[in-house]
Amino acid sequence: MGDERSMKRLLITGASGLLGANLVLEAMGAYEVIAVSRQHAVQQDGCIPVLADLAEEGAARRIVAEYGPEAVVHSAAATDLEACERDPEWAFLQNRDMARWVAEACRAHGAKLVHISTDAVFDGENGPYSELDPPRPISAYGESKLGGERAVLEAYEGAIVARCNFFGWNAQPKSSLGEWFLERLASGKPTPGFTDVWVSPLYAGHLARMVLALVERGEGGLIHLPGADCVSKYHFGRRLARVFGLDPDLVQPASVEDAGLQARRAKRLCLRGARAETALGVKLPSLEEGLRAFRRHGEDGYRQRLRALVGRE
């Protein structure tokens, strides 16, 4: 690997995932992108694809040493709450141990690290939450992600831990919350929306830009990257329907308590984003702005470019 290059080298883990793929597209042209994924190699001109399982001890240190990035965004994680609840040991390997190994590798090689975390580190009893509020997860997923936050900050004091909740177009053939609502509503199907689960959703494209701003000028520690609006999943579905010109009355009020889910869901996980607005000099995007960008990217070729990253187009 030669040291002469004109652009900063950015390594993105989970590069074929929902946020990771959006990060790849957003970063191309501004960075030399190293796209690390476990199963689906990223296919993009000017991007260096790396297939690796970072949950194997030593893999992160080897890859960071080989490619020498100036910065790393660690978005790879186990995000299926039900799978995490069924196998907490696996969840902690994916969300705590892997995060620690990535942080240790970044510290050893002097790479800036932005670690992606979640609002699910809170119990949902007293939201909206700031970075100063004590985390109290109520699921194996939340516990494992909190373990990851702590492992990262213990291993690498200068690391940035960014908590968020996001929606958007997925490169892989599985639906995010926004895509799930859209697919059902476009088919005219009545669709349940939880009235008792509230979040601060941020469009993945907007989140990708904020994460890259952290890469450039963020400081170590915790930071929340929420959307500006605190909404229930029921209201999210209805507002999505209106933006896409679909029938909002197809979204039916429902309770998470009746959904038969194994993992407990916290009820009010909205986040406060004042620190992000100050640190990054930005105004948090509203849900309306996010949904309009979601629709625009579904129509202007952006979604196809995302899918092409993993060979779906």
Image (cartoon, rainbow, N blue to C red):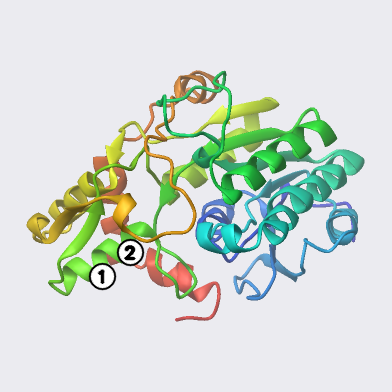
> In whole angstroms, how far apart are the C-alphas of marks 2 and 1?
6 Å
Helix, strand or loop under label 1: helix
Q: Mark 2 and 1 residues: CB-CB less than 8 Å, in contact?
A: yes
Helix, strand or loop under label 2: helix
Above or below, 305 relative to 222? below
User: Circle 1 is placed at which residue position?
Assistant: 183
Instruction: Tell me the number on the disc at residue 210.
Output: none
- 190 vs 218, left or right, is left
Q: Does any portion of residue 207 appear in the rendered image?
A: yes
What x and y, as percent, mark residue 144?
A: 66, 47
- 73 vs 232, left or right, is right
Q: Quadrant of residue 48?
A: bottom right
Few, some or many residues within 10 Å of mark 2 (<14, 14–19, 20+): some
- For the point 65% across and 39% down, the residue is 146
Q: Disc 1 marks which amino acid?
A: Glu
- For the point 17% across and 70% down, the residue is 186
Image quarter of the C terminus: bottom left
Q: Out of 213 and 129, give the one closest to the viewer.
A: 129
Few, some or many residues within 10 Å of mark 1 (<14, 14–19, 20+): few
Instruction: Tell me the number on the disc at residue 179.
Output: 2
Q: Out of 95 and 83, give the one closest to the viewer.
A: 83
Q: Disc 2 marks which amino acid?
A: Glu
- For the point 24% across and 44% down, the residue is 195
